[in-house]
Amino acid sequence: MRKLACIALIALAIGLNATPPAAAHSFSPQQKQEIDKLIQDYLRQHPEAVMESLKAAQQKADAAQAAQQQQAIASKRGELLHDPNSAIGGNPNGDITLVEFFDYRCPYCKALEPSLEALIKEDGKLRVVYKEFPILGPTSVFASRVAIAARKQGKYAAFHDRMMALRGTIDDDAIMNVARAAGLDLTILKRDMASSETKAIIQHNYALADALGIDATPALVIGNKLTMGAVDIDGLRQMIADARKADKKGS
């Protein structure tokens, strides 16, 4: 009741300020002053009503955003799950897919990596799709180009795992040292890094992320839900379980 009263008063105040000229004479200046005072007095006496209204508005906005994201995920499902240019981890024929947008220089991506590795080992039906999403500068783009080129030599996983474990200063030299340790032929690697195909893959991932509203790393798509930021292993387990449950209901 209190929240409804607050909303009604605020709506009345907005209505007064937006009253069309033909209806402007409905309230006299004195009446408008009295109404303004009534609203101000009420808000001073019941500040919690404002918080409740703001909370309800935020919940409504969050629900609308979630619905929009779900619609975007559904429209881009093929690109998310079955892009031949994306590396696959876990069980290629798994019953649920986790899509990760990541940056090799992102500390939160590195913090998430052990949980992902543990989940792949414990969940034999989990499929992981890796989306190169370098947003932290030219060095990040360089690392993604190396990773994409490494796929052509069948050494994506070897490079990816080492890069995710790399700490300290990450520059082009450090990245090439990782590539060398992963057993990559650097001459072939540099050629493939410079190809238009490698550039196109990164640009495609940028466009896909933009369509989904992704602007940070890590970003995870599991089922029809998008989560941005590091998630602990229990949170990931729950998200995967929820996605499986939703799939069963939909089938």
Image (cartoon, grey):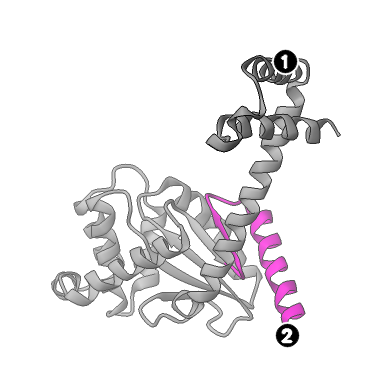
Please provide the residue range marked out in magenta: 222-251
For disc 2, the marked residue is 251
Name the amino acid type tagged 1: Arg
Is disc 1 surrounded by few (<14), some (14 to 19) or many (20+) residues within 10 Å? few
157 relative position to 128: left or right: left
Where in the figure is residue 102, as x and y percent of width and height? 42, 58
Name the amino acid type tagged 2: Ser
Magenta stretch contains residue 92 = no
State yes or no: discs 2 and 1 in contact (Cβ < 8 Å): no
Q: Toward which corner of the image does residue 162 lie, by quadrant?
A: bottom left
Secondary structure mostly taken by the magenta-highlighted segment of the chain? helix
Q: Earlier in the sequence, mark 2 or mark 1?
A: 1
For disc 1, the marked residue is 44
Where in the figure is residue 134, as x and y percent of width and height? 32, 57
166 relative position to 241: left or right: left
Gap in angstroms between the C-alphas marked 2 and 1: 53 Å
Residue at figure coordinates x 58%, y 35% from the top left:
19
* Element type where label 1 sits in the image: helix
* Element type where label 2 sits in the image: loop
Where in the figure is residue 210, as x and y percent of width and height? 40, 61
Q: Toward which corner of the image does residue 54 lie, by quadrant?
A: top right
**Residue situated furthest right in the rendering:** 1
Look at the image and tell me in which quarter the C terminus lies: bottom right
Residue 99 seen in this snapshot: yes
